Image (cartoon, grey):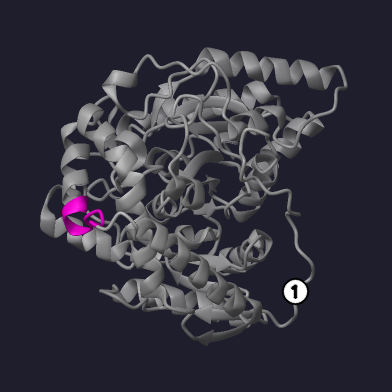
C-alpha cells in the first residue's frame, strides 16, 4: 500500500517505530500531489523544499532519541486564510498576494509543535464566504468525486486534498459550515469544534467582529475519525492570543447510558432532499445497532436559531467583510456577496444585532437543556445535494443554497461543535450527516462517528475524474 494512502495515526506509528522515515512519507504525498493536484487545484501553494527539510529534521530528531510529538513527521495542509510563518495570508485576493505572515496562527503553531510537516496551503473562496472554492488569485478548486459540483466552501481545497490522498489531515475553519460542508461534498470527515476549543488569532486580519468571535472555529478534515481525534487533541492546546479559548478537558465524564440521540432528518424551514433525509435515518440505524437510543425528535426552535445566524452574519460579520470583498474580491465573490445580502439583508434597526445576541443566549440555554437529555443530535450536513459550481451567481441559485445551508448554520449560531460524516451515496457523490454534541463533548460526537464509520466502511482516497 502506498504511504500517501495511509491515515495520520498509522503514519505517525510507522515513523515512530522507524519502519518508514518522514522523508519517505512526505515524498509519497508530494508525488501524489504531482499526480492529482493539476486536476483539482486543491493545494495552491506547494512547499516541497520546506517540507522535505522539515521531514529530514524530524528524522534526525528521532535518530537522536528526542521526544516525538503525536504528529511527528506527518504531512498536513493549511488553509490560505490562516497565518503561517513565511507564507502569505492571501485570502484568495490578488491585492493580498504578498501579505506574508510573520508568525504562526495558534492552530498552526500547535500543529508545528506536535511535529507536523506542512506540505502546502489549500484553496478557499475570497475571504472564505462562499460554498464555492474559487478566487481571482488561485482559480477554481474542483471536486474529485464530480467536477460539475462544488468541493464545498470555504475549506474546499482542504476537503478535495484529503479526499484525493494528498495528505491525511487538512486544516480548515468554520463560521457557517466551512469545515462540514467541504467534508460532505468530498465524502470525508470534518470536525467543526465548539467555541473556545481551538485557539484562533490572525495578526493579518486584526480584531474580529463579535459574530466571528462567537461563531467561527477551527477544525480538521480527514479520511478517518481517529485522525480527527488526533488532530483535535493537537490543535486544541491553549494560546494566550485567543481571549475565548477555554481550558476544558477534551474527554468529558462518562455519559449516562444508553446515550440518547435525537434524529432530525427533515430540518424545518425549507426543502430537504430525500437522499439527505435517508442518510440521517441510516445513521440512526447504525447508532441504534450499537446500543444508542435513537428517536426522531426536534431540538428547540431550529428556525429561530437560523434567524439568529443570519442577523449576526448579515448585520455584523458582513458589516466588516462586505466592504473588503467589494474592494478586493474577484467578480464571483462580489456577485455572490450581493446575491446573499439581497436574500438576507442587514437589519435596518441598529439594535437588531444586540437583540440577536440576547436571543442567542435564550436559545443556547434551551439547547443546553435539551442536550442534557439528548447528548447527540443528528441532522443533514446540507439539506440538499452539493450545489453545482457557481450556483451562487444568480438570485435563484443563491436562494437554493441559503435554503440548503440552514442545516449547517445551527451549530455555529450556538457555538456548538459538529462532526460531518459520510453516510450513503447519491450517484458519484456521498450523502452525509452532521452530529452535534452537547457543549464541550466533541468526544461523544467522535465516538458516534466511529460507529457510523465502522458501519459505512473506511473512506479511501479517490482518483479525481478527468475531463
Mark 1 = which residue?
255
Residue 305 or 20: which is nearer the viewer?
305
- Residue farthest to the right, as pictured: 65
Residue 333, can we see it?
Answer: yes
Does residue 364 appear left or right of residue 95 in this picture?
Answer: right
The residue shown at (43%, 19%) is 88
Task: Describe residue 221's horizontal placement relative to residue 387 as left or right.
Answer: right
- Magenta region includes residue 388: no
Q: Residue at x 39, y 77 (%)?
A: 278
Please report the residue visible at 41 percent of the width from the left and 49 percent of the height from the top.
178
Q: Is there any visible trace of residue 422 in the rendered image?
A: no
Residue 231 at what x, y percent from top left? Answer: 64, 43
- For the record, the magenta segment spans 340-348
Q: Is residue 27 left or right of residue 320?
A: right
Measuring from the top left, give residue 430's x and y in whole percent: 39, 61
Q: Position of residue 312 (x, y in %)?
A: 37, 55
Can residue 347 be found in the magenta stretch? Answer: yes
Residue 104 position in % (x across, y down):
58, 24
Task: In the rendered view, tell whether residue 458 sits above or below residue 47.
Answer: below
Q: For residue 309, what is the image quadrant?
A: bottom left
**236 shown above or below 110:** below
Q: Quadrant of the N terminus?
A: top right
Look at the picture and state if 91 lies above or below 236: above
Number of marks in picture:
1
In which quadrant will I find the C terminus? top left
Amino acid at each position: 500500500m502506498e504511504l500517501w494512502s495511509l491515515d495520520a495515526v498509522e503514519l505517525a506509528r510507522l515513523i515512530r517505530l522507524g519502519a518508514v522515515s518522514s522523508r519517505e512519507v512526505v515524498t509519497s504525498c508530494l508525488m501524489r500531489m504531482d499526480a492529482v493536484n493539476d486536476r483539482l487545484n486543491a493545494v495552491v501553494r506547494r512547499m516541497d523544499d520546506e517540507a522535505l527539510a522539515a521531514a529530514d529534521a524530524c528524522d534526525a530528531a528521532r535518530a537522536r532519541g528526542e521526544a516525538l510529538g503525536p504528529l511527528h513527521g506527518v504531512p498536513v495542509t493549511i488553509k490560505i486564510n490562516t497565518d503561517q510563518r513565511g507564507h502569505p495570508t492571501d485570502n484568495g485576493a490578488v491585492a493580498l498576494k504578498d501579505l506574508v505572515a510573520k508568525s504562526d496562527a495558534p492552530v498552526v503553531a500547535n500543529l508545528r509543535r506536535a511535529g507536523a510537516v506542512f506540505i502546502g496551503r489549500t484553496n478557499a473562496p475570497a475571504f472564505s464566504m462562499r460554498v464555492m472554492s474559487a478566487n481571482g488569485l488561485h482559480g477554481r478548486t474542483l471536486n474529485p468525486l464530480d467536477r460539475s459540483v462544488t468541493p464545498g466552501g470555504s475549506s474546499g481545497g482542504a476537503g478535495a486534498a484529503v479526499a484525493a490522498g494528498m495528505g491525511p489531515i487538512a486544516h480548515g475553519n468554520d463560521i457557517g459550515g466551512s469545515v462540514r460542508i467541504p467534508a460532505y461534498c468530498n465524502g470525508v470527515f470534518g470536525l467543526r469544534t465548539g467555541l473556545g476549543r481551538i485557539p484562533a488569532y490572525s495578526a493579518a486580519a486584526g480584531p474580529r467582529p463579535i459574530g466571528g468571535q462567537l461563531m467561527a472555529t477551527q477544525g480538521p478534515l480527514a479520511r478517518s475519525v481517529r485522525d480527527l481525534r488526533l488532530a483535535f487533541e493537537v490543535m486544541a492546546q491553549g494560546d494566550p492570543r485567543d481571549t475565548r479559548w477555554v481550558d476544558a478537558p477534551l474527554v468529558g465524564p462518562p455519559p449516562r447510558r444508553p446515550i440518547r440521540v435525537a434524529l432530525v432528518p427533515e430540518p424545518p424551514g425549507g426543502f430537504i432532499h430525500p437522499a439527505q433525509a435517508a442518510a440521517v435515518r441510516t445513521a440512526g440505524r447504525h447508532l441504534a445497532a450499537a446500543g444508542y437510543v435513537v428517536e426522531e425528535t426536534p431540538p428547540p426552535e431550529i428556525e429561530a436559531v437560523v434567524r439568529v445566524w443570519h442577523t449576526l452574519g448579515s448585520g455584523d460579520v458582513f458589516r466588516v467583510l462586505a466592504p473588503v470583498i467589494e474592494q478586493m474580491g474577484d467578480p464571483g465573490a462580489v456577485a455572490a456577496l450581493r446575491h446573499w445580502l439581497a436574500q438576507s439583508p442587514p437589519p435596518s434597526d441598529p439594535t437588531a444585532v444586540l437583540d440577536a445576541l440576547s436571543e442567542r443566549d435564550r436559545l443556547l440555554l434551551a439547547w443546553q437543556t435539551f442536550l442534557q437529555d439528548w447528548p447527540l443530535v443528528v441532522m443533514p450536513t446540507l439539506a440538499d445535494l452539493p450545489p453545482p459550481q457557481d450556483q451562487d451567481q444568480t438570485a435563484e441559485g443563491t436562494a437554493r443554497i441559503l435554503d440548503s445551508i440552514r442545516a449547517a448554520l445551527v451549530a455555529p449560531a450556538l457555538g456548538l461543535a459538529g462532526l460531518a460524516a459520510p453516510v450513503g451515496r447519491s450517484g458519484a457523490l456521498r450523502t452525509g450527516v452532521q452530529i452535534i454534541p452537547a457543549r464541550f463533548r466533541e468526544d461523544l460526537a467522535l465516538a458516534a462517528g466511529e460507529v457510523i464509520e465502522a458501519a459505512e466502511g473506511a473512506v479511501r482516497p479517490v482518483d479525481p475524474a478527468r475531463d
